Image (tube, coloured by chain):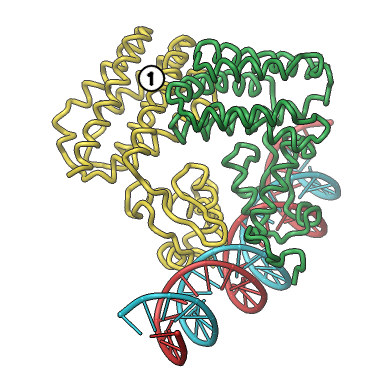
Chain colours: A green, B yellow, C cyan, D red
DNA sequence: TGCGGTAAAAATATCGATTTTCCGGCCGAT
DNA sequence: ATCGGCCGGAAAATCGATATTTTTACCGCA
C-alpha cells in the first residue's frame, strides 16, 4: 500500500514500522522536541508520526532501554525527566567509563583501528557545523571509534548510551553558541593525537577535560 | 473475564498482562529454561504463558533493555546467546563497576544504610539454600544494598543489569554443588563486615575475590 | 546429483476494535 | 471548606484478524 515503503533497488531492506517509529521518537527526544517529563500519548504520536498504535507502543518500550523514555505500568509512557543531579550522574559515570574504555582501546591498539581513527578524525575536522545531523553523527562516530577497540561490547554499549543521554542535555540547553567560543576542534585533535601516539594518560586527560568543559558549559547554560 | 485477575483484597494492584509476561519470560531466561540463542516464537509463548500476542511482544521488547533478549527486525526475537567471551566481559565490567559503586557507597555511608545492610545480611545469613527463589532474591538484595548508597542511579542500574546477566550464567552451569564446597556465607560476611567498618579497600578486595571465585567455578563447570 | 526458483506454510508485524483502567470533576455529608 | 465516593470521558492495554515477510519444502532441469 505504502508506495514509499517499496523495496526499490536499494539492498537496504525496508525497515519495519516499529523501527522507523523508534528512530523518529528517539530523534524527537534527543533533540528536545519532546520535553523532559512530557507525557507520551499513544494517540498523539499516532497522528504525529502517522503510525499504528502497536509499533509506537513497541518503539517506546524499546526506547526504555536507552533510558530516554519511562514506562509506567498501566498509565503509559513519558519522556525521561531531567535534573541537575541526573546530568551530573551521567557526566561522572561517563568520564569513568570512557576513560576505562579509552585506555583499553589504546592498550589493544591495532593498525586497523588507528587507520579508522585517522579517517574519522579527518571527517570530523572537515565536518561543517551547519549540517546538524551530519555533524552530530560524525561527532559521535569519532568518540565511539576512540573507544571501539576496548574489546568489551558491554562497556561500549554503556558508553554509547551515556553519550546519547548527554547529547540530549546538550540539545536541551539553548543552542547557545558560547559553545562556539571554545575551540572544540582543537580539543578533538589533542585527544586524537594522543590516542594515535598510544599515550593513554594524555589521551584520557584530554578526553575527560573535553567532557568536563562541555559539562560546565551546559551547567552554566542551564541556569540561564 | 479472567477470574484469577480479580483485585481480591491485596492492595497490590493487578499487574498488567505485559508486566506479568515480562516477569515470566525473564524468569525463564534467567533460569536457563529458555536456552541461549533459542528463538522465541510469539505463537509458542502465547500458549506457554497463555497471554495475547501484544503483551508478549511488548514484554520481549522490554527484555531487550536487560540484554536478555535480542530483537531482530522483521524476524522476531531470540534469547541472548552466551559465550565465554561474553561471560568474561560481564565479569570484568562487573568487577570494575561494583568496585566503583561499593567505594562510593561506603564513602557516603549513613546510619540508615548501615542498618539496612545489617538487616539484609542477617536475612542472607539465615536464608536456606533450599528455597531457590527466596535465596536468590535475598542474595541479590544483599549485593545491591552494598552498592545502593553510591548516589548514582545510573551506576546502580548497570550493576543490577550485570548482576542478572551473571546470574543467568550461574544458572546455566549445572547446579553443580562444587559451589557448595566454598564457604560462600563466610565470603559474604567478610564483605559485609569490612563495609560496615567502612574499610573500602578491604571491602572491595573481598567483593572482587567473591566474584572472581564464582567466575572460576563457572568457567570450570562450563567446560564440563 | 545438485542447483535455482517458486509456491505453500509459518511466523512476524501491524491494524482496528474492544475492554480495562485511570483521572478529573461533581456532589453530598461531616 | 474538606473529605470521600461516584460518574463520564480519555487513555492505555489487550485481543482478534489481516497483511507482510521469512522459511521451508518441493520440483524440474542442467
Q: Residues within 10 Å of mark 1 (few under 14, many from 20)?
A: many
**B35 vs A134: above or below:** below
Front residue of this view, candidates A107 and B201: A107
* Total numbered labels placed on residues in the image: 1
**At x 79% / y 24%, what residue is drawn?**
A173
**At x 24% / y 36%, what residue is drawn?**
B219
Front residue of this view, candidates A137 and B100: A137
The N terminus of chain A, quarter of image: bottom right
Give the side of residue B100 with respect to residue A137, left or right: left
Where residue A64 sits: x, y (%)? Answer: 60, 42
Q: What residue does disc 1 label?
A: B117
**At x 75% / y 42%, what residue is drawn?**
A28
Where residue A20 sits: x, y (%)? Answer: 69, 53
Kindly indicate the quadrant of the structure image that contains residue A55.
bottom right
Give the side of residue B15 with respect to residue A211, left or right: left
**A3 vs C6: above or below:** above
Q: Is residue A50 visible?
A: yes
Report in which chain the residue with disc 1 lies: B
Where residue B103 sits: x, y (%)? Answer: 43, 13
**B108 vs C24: above or below:** above
Kindly indicate the quadrant of the structure image that contains residue A15.
bottom right
The C terminus of chain A, quarter of image: top right
Give the side of residue C5 with respect to residue B182, left or right: right
Where residue A154 sits: x, y (%)? Answer: 46, 34
Q: Is residue A54 visible?
A: no
Kindly indicate the quadrant of the structure image that contains residue A118.
top right
Q: Secondary structure at mark 1?
A: helix
Amino acid at each position: 500500500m505504502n508506495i514509499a515503503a517499496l523495496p526499490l533497488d536499494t539492498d537496504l531492506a525496508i525497515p519495519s514500522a516499529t523501527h522507523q517509529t523508534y528512530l523518529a521518537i528517539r530523534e524527537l527526544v534527543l533533540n528536545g522536541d519532546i520535553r523532559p517529563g512530557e507525557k507520551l500519548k499513544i494517540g498523539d504520536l499516532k497522528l504525529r508520526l502517522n503510525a499504528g498504535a502497536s509499533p509506537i507502543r513497541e518503539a517506546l518500550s524499546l526506547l526504555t532501554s536507552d533510558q530516554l523514555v519511562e514506562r509506567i505500568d498501566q498509565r503509559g509512557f513519558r519522556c525521561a525527566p531531567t535534573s541537575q543531579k541526573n546530568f551530573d550522574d551521567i557526566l561522572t559515570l561517563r568520564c569513568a567509563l570512557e576513560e576505562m574504555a579509552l585506555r583499553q582501546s589504546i592498550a589493544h591498539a591495532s593498525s586497523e583501528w588507528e587507520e579508522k581513527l585517522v579517517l574519522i578524525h579527518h571527517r570530523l575536522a572537515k565536518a561543517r557545523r551547519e549540517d546538524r545531523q551530519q555533524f552530530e553523527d560524525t561527532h559521535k562516530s569519532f568518540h565511539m571509534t576512540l573507544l571501539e577497540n576496548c574489546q568489551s561490547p558491554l562497556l561500549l554499549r554503556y558508553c554509547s548510551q551515556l553519550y546519547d543521554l548527554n547529547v540530549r542535555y546538550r540539545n536541551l540547553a539553548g543552542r547557545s553558541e558560547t559553545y562556539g567560543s571554545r575551540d572544540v576542534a582543537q580539543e578533538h585533535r589533542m585527544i586524537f593525537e594522543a590516542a594515535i601516539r598510544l599515550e593513554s594518560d594524555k589521551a584520557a586527560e584530554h578526553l575527560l577535560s573535553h567532557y568536563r568543559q562541555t559539562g560546565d558549559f551546559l551547567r552554566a547554560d542551564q541556569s540561564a
